[in-house]
Image (cartoon, grey):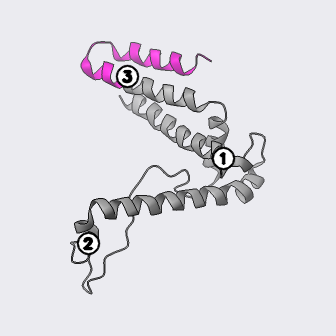
Amino acid sequence: MQLLVAVANQLRKLILIREFMDGPHGGVWHADMAFQRFRQEVMPRIQDHDAALKALENKWAEALMPEIHGEGSPKANKKGNRRKKGVKTDLLIAPNPKNAYPVYLMMKKAELFSKKELRDGYTGTLEADRAIKSGAHQPRQVLEWVVLQLTRN
C-alpha cells in the first residue's frame, strides 16, 4: 500500500506541474532549459502560481468555515485578532521555493507525459487501491499492473 500511495502522490504532483506548464504561466518552460535560467525565469512564476493558490484556498476555508476563522473563534489571540495561519495544502508546486532543483527535476519528468497519460495513471492507482483493499487480487499483481500501465508508452 505504501508503494501505491507513493506512486499516486508522484502522479498527483506531476499532474499539478503539467497543468502549470500548459497554463499561461508555464509558457517560459522548455525541456532543455538550464537550471540557472529555470531559477531566474520559471521559479518566480511558480511562486506566483503557488501564492495565488494559497490565497484562493484560504478564501475558500474562510467561506466554508467562518466560525473557525472569524472573530471570537478559538484561533483568536487575547486581543481578539485572529491568527494568520494559512490552510495546509499539498497542492503547491514549490512548497520550499529556496530549493528549486527538485522542482526543476519534476518539471523535466512532467514533460515526458501528457495530461491524459498522467490522469489515466492516477485513475489506475485509484482502481489498484480499490482492488487491493477489496481483496479481489493479490497486491503484487496489482502493483505490477500499475507499473505496466504507467510504462506502456
Query: What secondary structure is found at the residue carrying circle 3?
Result: helix
Left or right placement of residue 27 versus residue 50 in this view: right
Which label lies toward us, 2 or 1?
A: 2
Residue drawn at (61%, 30%) of the image: 114
Other-residue count near label 2 (Cα within 10 Å), few / some / many at <14 / 14–19 / ≥20: some
> Which amino acid type is shown beneath numbered disc 1?
Tyr
Q: Position of residue 105 (x, y in %)?
A: 65, 42
- In the rendered structure, does residue 100 fall within the stretch colored magenta? no
Instruction: Give the residues drawn in magenta, as a range.
Output: 128-153
Q: Is residue 91 above or below residue 64?
A: above
Residue closest to the far bottom? 79
Q: Which residue is mark 2?
A: 75
Q: CA–CA distance between discs 3 and 2? A: 39 Å
Residue drawn at (62%, 36%) of the image: 110
Q: CA–CA distance between discs 2 and 1? A: 37 Å
Q: Which residue is mark 1?
A: 104
Q: Which residue is mark 3?
A: 127
Counting residues from the N terminus, which is met first, the one under dot 2 or under dot 1?
2
